[in-house]
Amino acid sequence: MRLNEISYNDAVPIDGYGPGFFRVGGQKHDGAVLVLPTGVSVWGGFEDTAAVLEHISDIDVLFVGTGAEIAHPPKDFRTTLEEAGIGVETMASPAACRTYNVLLSEGRRVAVALLPV
């Protein structure tokens, strides 16, 4: 088997997660987080679209991790982001972490908003 080293350039990958926290770029963050190519911040949940919209020029797709199980985000949340030109993909938080890391390693313009597991 051939292994290739993954490079994230200046972006920070998600290293892990557990009950109530995420480890991003080697640092632990409690609660919901928004991970952008430029860094990590606290995310206020589905009511907090402003934090994502501030970085509209940096991302094309936002992955939304809804916790341990997949759930539908509120319609207003999705509509606000899609009307601004950001694609929204919803999945369970573990899948969102993995998907974000893969696309980030490919140099894609992605972000992820995560609710804890």
Image (cartoon, grey):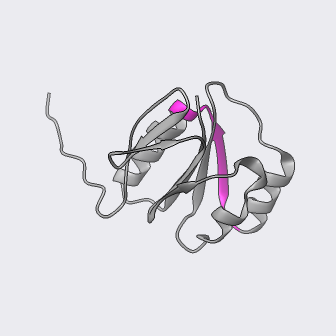
Q: Residue at x 59, y 34 (%)?
A: 116
Residue 70 in the image, given as x and y percentages of width and height: 68, 29
| Rendered view: 32 above or below 1 | below
Whether residue 55 appears in magenta in the rendering, the answer is no
Residue 100 in the image, given as x and y percentages of width and height: 47, 46
Number of marks drawn: 0
Q: Quadrant of the N terminus?
A: top left
Position of 32 compared to 10: left or right? right
Q: Residue at x 43, y 50 (%)?
A: 103
Q: Among all residues in the image, which is located at the extreme right?
A: 76
Give, as a single range, the part of the protein colored magenta.
85-94
| Rendered view: 24 above or below 10 | above
Q: Quadrant of the C terminus?
A: top right
Q: Among all residues in the image, which is located at the extreme bottom?
A: 57
Position of 30 compared to 102: left or right? right
Residue 34 in the image, given as x and y percentages of width and height: 56, 53
Position of 83 compared to 95: left or right? right
Q: Residue at x 58, y 40 (%)?
A: 31
Task: Say which of 105 and 39 sits in front.
Answer: 39
Task: Say which of 103 and 71 sits in front.
Answer: 71
Position of 64 compared to 21: left or right? right
